[in-house]
């Protein structure tokens, strides 16, 4: 079981080390070793991890209360459904990015190019971005020690002493405002904006971002940065001739909504706050609604999602690989065939990083309450090895100790607000082989 072994060995090793040290690690499932993995996986300790809709906004550009109201009105899951498996694993969070941000969300926002305004950037003579800074105090804290001869980082030293920036720009948004007590507007050299969100109810003074940007311009004229005393102002909402600067900086117009999975990976980035219809597309699709219906049944074991690529020959070979694997495993498994270019399944396909129009198919094993093993893709010969499918099926059906949940999670949940066509979707069952008869114990 090559594919599966790579998933479970590190977890078992960690468990052994923890047991030796007398520590408790992760969500441990107390299990016997004579139950199939698909039975163990239905334990509540193996529940799907939550996905998060993170709305990043700046005051003046979005109303976070309106988004929360839309979430409630979308009716993404029936409130009367008390089944733990059928519950939708989707939460929401609104984040003012001019204030304190948790470490995990800070990394996610940075990787997605989400910045608060105003912000600064150093450009070279060709207009290439050399470095970005969230505030003038941060820029001084990172660059001034280097200019004074103290090495803070190689990249900063290289920028100031060798590459010589040619232009300094300050990007603001004429539609946005900022709290004067935020770390960005502060005159203190605070290098990061990470902290605990205050519950204080004191009144906040809010000003346009242009006001802070103009203050930075005056400060730079009095005390240059990296040899540059002049800064150009660029309005994100009306960049004009500086549109190329915005593109080079890869900045996103706020507000932005990010769909984040249970492993803190960004599944999708939306350039606006989703409405009720889009929220339903994020949470539900014909295939996912049928999968949760299947997994929620008492006799559920696993299913396979067969994502079809553009190459019909490879698709047929993938079907043959599934049939061969199930024949060898002597199991009957439900197979959901999904068109890889189906817009209705966009957010399902994004979870596996399957690109629309992709040539090659993909097979995704799903078990338990919505856990996913590594997607099975084509090999160097552009074929799917039946042994890889067999590995996944045998892992789910075979007995054995599995103390730490493996794989990642699907975004799933029952709903009583499904469109009519979703109820017409019928899965394809591969009944080539009957389940193996239970062996008598000696």
Image: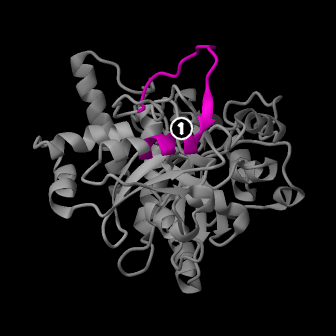
Residue with the mark numbered 1: 97
Residue 134 seen by the camera: no
Looking at the image, which residue is at 85% across and 42% down?
Answer: 416
Near mark 1 (Cα within 10 A), the count class, few <14, some 14-19 or many ≥20, is: many
> Quadrant location of the C terminus?
top left
Taking depth in this image into account, of 408 and 322 the one nearest to the observer is 408
Looking at the image, which residue is at 44% across and 55% down?
Answer: 374
- Residue furthest to the front in view is 222
Q: Quadrant of residue 76?
A: top right
For residue 24, above or below residue 178: above
211 in magenta: yes
| Label 1 element class | loop
Residue 242, percent across and down?
51, 67
Taking depth in this image into account, of 180 and 333 the one nearest to the observer is 180
Q: Which residues are magenta?
A: 193-217
Looking at the image, which residue is at 54% across and 71% down?
Answer: 241
Direction from residue 130 to residue 350 in the image, left or right: right
Residue 245, percent across and down?
47, 65
Residue 342, percent across and down?
69, 69
């Amino acid at each position: 079981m090559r594919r599966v072994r790579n998933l479970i060995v590190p977890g078992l090793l960690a468990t052994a080390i923890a047991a030796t040290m007398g520590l408790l690690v992760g969500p441990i499932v107390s299990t016997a070793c004579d139950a199939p993995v698909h039975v163990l996986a239905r334990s509540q300790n193996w529940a799907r991890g939550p996905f998060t809709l993170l709305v990043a906004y700046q005051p003046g550009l979005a109303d976070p209360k309106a988004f929360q109201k839309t979430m409630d009105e979308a009716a993404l899951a029936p409130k009367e459904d008390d089944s733990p498996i059928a519950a939708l694993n989707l939460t929401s969070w609104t984040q003012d990015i001019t204030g304190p941000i948790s470490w995990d969300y800070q990394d996610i926002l940075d990787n997605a190019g989400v910045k608060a305004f105003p912000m600064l950037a150093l450009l070279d003579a060709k207009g290439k971005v050399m470095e970005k800074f969230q505030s003038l105090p941060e820029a001084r804290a990172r660059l001034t020690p280097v200019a004074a001869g103290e090495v803070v980082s190689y990249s900063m030293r290289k920028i100031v002493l060798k590459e010589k920036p040619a232009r300094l720009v300050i990007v603001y948004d004429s539609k946005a405002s900022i709290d004067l007590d935020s770390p960005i507007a502060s005159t203190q050299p605070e290098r990061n904006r990470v902290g605990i969100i205050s519950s204080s109810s004191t009144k906040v003074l809010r000003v346009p971002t242009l006001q802070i940007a103009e203050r930075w311009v005056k400060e730079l004229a009095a005390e240059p940065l990296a040899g540059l005393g002049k800064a150009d102002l660029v309005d994100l909402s009306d960049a004009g001739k500086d549109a190329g600067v915005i593109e080079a900086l890869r900045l996103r117009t706020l507000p932005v909504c990010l769909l984040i999975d249970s492993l803190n990976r960004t599944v999708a980035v939306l350039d606006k706050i989703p409405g009720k219809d889009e929220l339903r597309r994020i949470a539900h699709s014909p295939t996912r609604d049928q999968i949760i219906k299947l997994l929620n049944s008492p006799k559920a074991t696993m299913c396979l999602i067969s994502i079809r690529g553009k190459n019909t020959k490879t698709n047929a070979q993938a079907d043959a690989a599934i049939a061969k694997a199930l024949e060898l495993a002597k199991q009957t498994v439900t197979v959901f065939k999904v068109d890889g270019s189906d817009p209705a399944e966009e957010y399902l396909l994004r979870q596996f990083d399957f690109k629309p129009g992709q040539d090659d198919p993909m097979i995704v094993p799903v078990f338990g309450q919505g856990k996913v093993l590594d997607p099975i893709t084509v090999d160097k010969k552009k074929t799917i090895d039946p042994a890889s499918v067999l590995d996944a099926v045998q892992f789910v059906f075979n007995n054995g100790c599995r103390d730490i949940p493996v794989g990642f999670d699907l975004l799933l949940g029952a709903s009583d607000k499904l469109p009519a066509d979703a109820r017409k979707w019928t899965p394809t069952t591969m009944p080539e082989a009957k389940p193996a008869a239970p062996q008598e114990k000696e």
